[in-house]
Image (spheres, grey):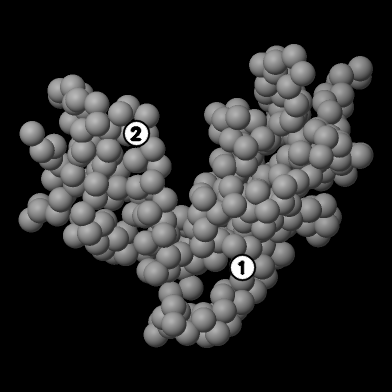
Amino acid sequence: MYQAYLSYFAEEISVQSEAIQAFARVAMRASDGHEGGSHPLSVVLVAGPLGSGKRTLMEALARLLLGSDRRVIKINPSLFPQAGHLLTYLASACQAFDATLLPGENPLRLIFVNPIEKSQPAVMELFIDIFTNGEAMLVPGWTVDFRRTIFVLETDVGELETGEELFLGFKASDPEAVAKEDARFRKTIEERVYASFPPRLLSLVDEFVFFRKIREWDLRSILEKLLRTLRQRLTSLGLHLHVEDAASNFLLSAGNRSLRFGTKGLRQAVDRHLETPLRDLLASRPLPTGAVIYARRTLNGIALFVPL
């Protein structure tokens, strides 16, 4: 089962091997059918640069365990100045979620908290209490149970740290040097995380998941995954997509220009130059079943055409 989970998360973003292993362990704990004792099922703290795949794996975990990433309960703690306000919201959100469960469905919740470091001291104490006891009392006689809950805490600490000064001159062909710089970069992020949170909170974290910087040579595998997903959607409509090499290189170049923001630039390029034109094409006229849509590099970007 663990190997199956590794393969599942690798389909999402294969370049983050350490994070994939951590999320696979979380999935294993969630699938064994046991509650977390007097604690939540898992408390996961994720950190790393912008666009490195933190939210991608959280949403993949939700699809795996809940069937949809739309079922995640999302919390921005900066919007709750008092702990009582947050607990009331959590109680209502959990009650609404539980009402959607089908008979016999696993009563598992996933709560995503971002940015955790923006919590007021009283709110941080509430989180510590929940992670310690697996429950919290809203009013006498009403206790909110979090023992079948996974908490994914995302921190923006270090998010804008690209580590560019560390990686200058290193290529994929020098894995030892890259590994050393990864370790240095991780240490920098860890130091900032440990300085930003109470030790009591950090002691309750089951998985501290570090996402490394996305580099130029990572983009091709990420692009292949994005294109594979797009092809699958078109295949379900009876259509096929062929992206010529020059068009793929154009997308990679666009992603590389904004590499400071991780995969966001590449995803935006795919949306702008492929997904949006595809939506316009499909809306403009019906295509026959089995039609092949070609994406070709042009002077202005990428053009789509369907041979007659």
Determine crowd level at label 2: few under 14, some 14-19, many 20+ residues with C-alpha closer than 10 A: some
Determine crowd level at label 1: few under 14, some 14-19, many 20+ residues with C-alpha closer than 10 A: many
The picture quadrant where one finds residue 237 is top left
Judging from the image, what secondary structure is the residue with disc 1 in? Answer: helix
Q: Position of residue 3 (x, y in %)?
A: 68, 53
What residue is at 24 percent from the left and 46 percent from the top?
242
Q: Position of residue 4 (x, y in %)?
A: 65, 49
What residue is at 32 percent from the left and 64 percent from the top?
256
**Disc number at residue 189?**
1
Classify 159 as above or below 24: below
**Disc number at residue 91?**
none
What residue is at 41 percent from the left and 56 percent from the top?
222
Judging from the image, what secondary structure is the residue with disc 2 in? Answer: helix
Classify 187 as above or below 156: below
Give, as a three-letter code, the residue at label 2: Thr
Q: Which circle's residue, 1 or 2, is located before the other in the chain?
A: 1
Left or right for 11, reference 46: left
- The C terminus sits in image quarter: top left
Q: Look at mark 2 in the image and give the residue it sits on.
A: 235
